[in-house]
Amino acid sequence: MVLCLALFLARASTVLFALQTTASAALMMTTTTTRLAEGQHYNFLSEIDETIQRVLATYDNDTLLSNVPECERQDLVIARALRGRLQDMERKRHCPICWLQNNYCFCADCPPVVPEEEDPTANTLNRLFLVMHHGEIGMGVDTAKLILASHPTKCRLVVAGIGSKYQKSMKELEDTIANSNRNCLVLFPDEASKPFHEIAKEEAAKTQYNEHFDDADDGNNRNNNNGWNIIVIDGTWQQARRIKKRYFGGGEETFPSSSSSLRLPSIRTARLSDKVLRTLEQELVDGEINPGHQLRKHSSTSRKVGTFEAVRLFLGDLVENNKVDNDDTTIPSWIQIEKYQQIANNALQAQNGFPC
């Protein structure tokens, strides 16, 4: 009798624990969804940490690279480097959103665009894939983190060099390119790049032609009318060129290492309009340093423009060249966030002891 009662209580305790765990998980999911819906920040570094754990769970800490399959060596090297970076940020009490010390956190001054789902950009933008060199993650001077902070539901952070076997965002990027290549653009100013208004005009002509001849597109070229998928590369110019060639150049080299061995077509490149570039070439705007210029020094004027400002202005090109039904009272996201880089620059200068 005592044994039966003990078994019953043990089982009841197990069931109760399971119910509590399920309820807790549901509450966490609801909280996350509500948080994003309320326009609060999302910690993308938590996703990176999950990716790191997946890689490191495969190999012991003392595993030699020579004993790792060649296609996964870079995954392991980057995961180990990022683990140390994140631990260092936590030890020094850096904010996981703006990547500055907590005392200089400026997140309250740079909230996500509100409301993101009602922004006119929402009708033309499906995803913003930020493909970042691992050396940029956690850098206070990096500007791409502002893209993540301002568009948490639209953005996906992809660490270059870690494949889709371990990184969910890389898998989503691969699938997006494979299934909707015509809707994908890499924001990269190479010789073949065109401003968005030219790309939009070409797409309109193709759509009109296909409708006239009832031309059936294959899957890779189908325009799904769900908006554009913009791929942004973040790193130094040398790093960005390598990432562009490795991932978005087409052919057998696309998505090497632990990613699936896809042969993907080259992706069209886009650049900012000439009108925007003329504005960015100005050293001063209204008597002040051009807010589009980043703090890192470059001899070339075009390279003074940070990743964040380039993306912000490109979003403006998207809105300007797409007719969308929009409430006149809704401020476009690219206007909402126009002061963010200057705010970030001031906070970083204050942290480093320089006058703002």
Image (cartoon, rainbow, N blue to C red):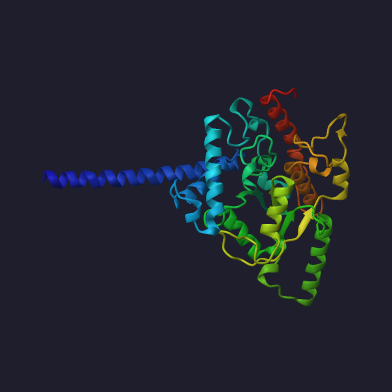
Name the spot of residue 182 as percent of width and height, x first: 72, 64
Quarter of the image for residue 137 reads: top right
Closer-to-camera residue (179/138): 138
How many marks do you count on the picture?
0
Left or right: 160 as drawn, with respect to 296: left
Q: Residue furthest front?
A: 66
Q: Up-down: is 172 above or below 109?
A: below
Could one spot residue 332 in this view of the protein? no
Name the spot of residue 347 as percent of width and height, x first: 69, 28
User: Could you tell me which quadrant the C terminus lies in?
Assistant: top right
Name the spot of residue 81 as percent of width and height, x first: 55, 43
Closer-to-camera residue (240/355): 240
Left or right: 28 as drawn, with respect to 213: left
The residue positioned 52% from the left and 49% from the top of the image is 51
The residue positioned 75% from the left and 44% from the top of the image is 312
Name the spot of residue 72 as percent of width and height, x first: 53, 56
